[in-house]
Image (tube, rainbow, N blue to C red):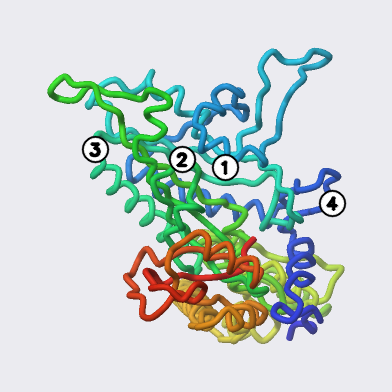
């Protein structure tokens, strides 16, 4: 039996629970002496690498080529797209000196890479034969966040993947938007995450985009966590950076573009927040740094025999899973159980005298802590079955919580009350920015957008102005 779980509670004191857990479970260390910058430790970085592998495999399967652009962008390139620079101007880190000399042209650390990449596209795209053009990169990006920073959720340097594409027609670009959405859906399914896929209001879309789609997921403190965005850029950036191609008839045309980005750090934060409990992290099997841990439960008079049998069990599961064995002799089995529960390992195998004698290791699943015995020659098959059930359970629990977090309201007072209860409000809205800003000032939340995956028909009046409602919108507090 494991030792008692931490007294910190996920839903009653999320900030303390989360901040302590990411440190104790070796996800990160936030004590790096520069605000908004963290160190990714072994458990967290391994999980990010697993997310990255799934993401990049899906991108490569759909024809995206991996690239790596410099971290810096020149001021003149960044300033070319007026709406874009207006959207990011307050968030950039400026580089003005090199050694003792002032730079002739100021540089910025990329907040995103459109203005770094797109000056190069005219060199690479000349004719219709070069299209579609699809690239991606997994890199850190830098944003001078002026709000309070939070580990994983709001950082000044964070890890993400961004995809950028160019197409011959608007129809091809629109199909690419849907491909980007589908890629992200598959990643989030592996992470067992539920979300709202929302079309952002025009006044809150990505700077320079025709429209933006975003994946907002719930958080135990009631603030939504944006874990990915997909944008249709139309020809806006193509006209600024003169990205043209010669079509089949010899005419010169501007390309149509899309881009999308998903923060590995935000996805990891959502995994911890959705699936973790008062014992610690719970990793979905596909993303778990360690999927199976074998723990010998030793007795002094039979220590070597138990250790030998535990190693034999470990060797039987190691080829099929990311596995570890905990042979530390300076701590009790209960302390080991608690440690690996905190680390989020989906399956624990306990091997003691009874298991050794009967040849039936005890298998414990992390999400429910249910225990089963299994014959050693059946253990790989059984673990696979348990992992499937565990994954589905995490997915269902996350979806149920998402559903529970949303409620319909018909007044600003009800919106404020709902947000204070750490929920998401669904409202009738006329679509105007004036009403959105007025509501935000009164309820300390914001209109996040309208559903992009299903059609919701408005009924009645705008909650703010009383005029005709044109859309059903979602209001939440956000990171």
Residue hosting label 2: 208
Q: Nearer the viewer, mark 3 or mark 1?
A: 1
Q: Which quadrant, please, contains the N terminus?
A: bottom right
Q: Which mark is residue 169?
A: 3
Point 40% across, 60% down: residue: 186
Mark 1 Cα-neighbour bin, 10 Å: few <14, some 14–19, many ≥20 = some
Q: Name the spot of residue 431 as percent of width and height, x first.
A: 43, 64
Residue 235 vertical placement versus 7 (above, below): above
For the residues marked 4 and 1, what is the alpha-carbon distance in whole angstroms? 30 Å
Q: Position of residue 70 (x, y in %)?
A: 58, 27
All told, the count of numbered labels is 4
Q: Is residue 250 above or below residue 405?
A: above
**Residue 205 relative to residue 183: left or right:** right
Q: Secondary structure at mark 4?
A: loop
Q: Which residue is mark 4?
A: 31
Q: Are marks 4 and 2 in contact (CB under 8 Å)?
A: no
Q: Nearer the viewer, mark 4 or mark 2?
A: 2
- Farthest residue to the left: give it: 249
Whichever of callouts 1 and 2 sits on the residue coming sooner in the sequence is 1
Task: Check disc 1 and report the residue beneath it.
Answer: 87
């Amino acid at each position: 039996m494991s030792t008692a779980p931490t007294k910190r509670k996920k839903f009653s004191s999320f900030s303390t629970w989360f901040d302590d857990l990411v440190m104790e479970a070796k996800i990160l260390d936030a004590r790096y002496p520069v605000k908004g910058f963290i160190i990714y430790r072994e458990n967290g970085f391994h999980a990010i690498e697993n997310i990255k592998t799934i993401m990049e495999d899906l991108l490569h399967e759909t024809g995206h080529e991996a690239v790596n652009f410099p971290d810096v962008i020149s001021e003149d390139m960044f300033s070319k797209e007026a709406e874009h620079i207006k959207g990011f101007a307050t968030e950039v880190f400026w580089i003005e000196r090199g050694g003792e000399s002032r730079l002739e042209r100021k540089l910025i650390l990329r907040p995103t890479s459109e203005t770094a990449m797109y000056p190069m596209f005219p060199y690479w795209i000349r004719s219709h034969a070069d299209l579609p053009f699809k690239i991606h990169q997994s890199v850190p990006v830098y944003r001078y966040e002026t709000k309070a920073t939070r580990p994983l959720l709001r950082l000044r340097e964070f890890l993400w993947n961004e995809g950028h594409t160019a197409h011959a027609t608007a129809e091809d670009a629109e199909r690419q938007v849907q491909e980007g959405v589908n890629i992200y859906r598959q990643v989030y399914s592996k992470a067992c995450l539920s979300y709202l896929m929302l079309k952002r209001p025009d006044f809150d879309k990505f700077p320079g985009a025709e429209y933006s789609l975003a994946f907002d997921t719930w958080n135990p403190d009631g603030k939504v966590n944006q874990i990915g965005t997909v944008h249709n850029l139309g020809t806006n950036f193509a006209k600024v950076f003169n990205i043209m191609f010669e079509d089949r008839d010899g005419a010169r045309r501007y390309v149509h573009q899309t881009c999308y980005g998903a923060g590995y750090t935000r996805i990891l934060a959502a995994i911890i927040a959705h699936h973790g409990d008062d014992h610690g992290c719970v990793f979905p099997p596909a993303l778990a740094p360690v999927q199976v841990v074998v723990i010998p439960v030793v007795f002094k008079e039979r220590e070597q025999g138990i250790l030998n049998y535990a190693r034999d069990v470990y060797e039987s599961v190691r080829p099929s899973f990311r596995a570890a064995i905990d042979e530390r002799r300076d701590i009790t089995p209960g302390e080991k159980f608690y440690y690996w529960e905190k680390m989020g390992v989906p399956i624990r195998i306990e091997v003691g005298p009874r298991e050794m004698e009967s040849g039936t290791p005890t298998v414990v699943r992390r999400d429910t802590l249910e225990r089963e015995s299994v014959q050693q020659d059946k253990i790989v098959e059984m673990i696979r079955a348990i992992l499937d059930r565990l994954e589905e359970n995490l997915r269902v629990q996350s979806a149920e919580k998402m559903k529970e977090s949303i409620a319909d309201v018909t007044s600003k007072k009800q919106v404020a009350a709902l947000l204070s209860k750490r929920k998401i409000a669904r409202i009738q809205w006329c679509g105007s920015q004036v009403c959105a800003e007025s509501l935000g000032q009164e309820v300390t939340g914001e209109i996040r957008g309208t559903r992009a995956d299903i059609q919701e028909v408005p009924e009645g009046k705008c909650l703010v102005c009383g005029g005709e409602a044109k859309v059903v919108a979602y209001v939440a507090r956000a990171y």
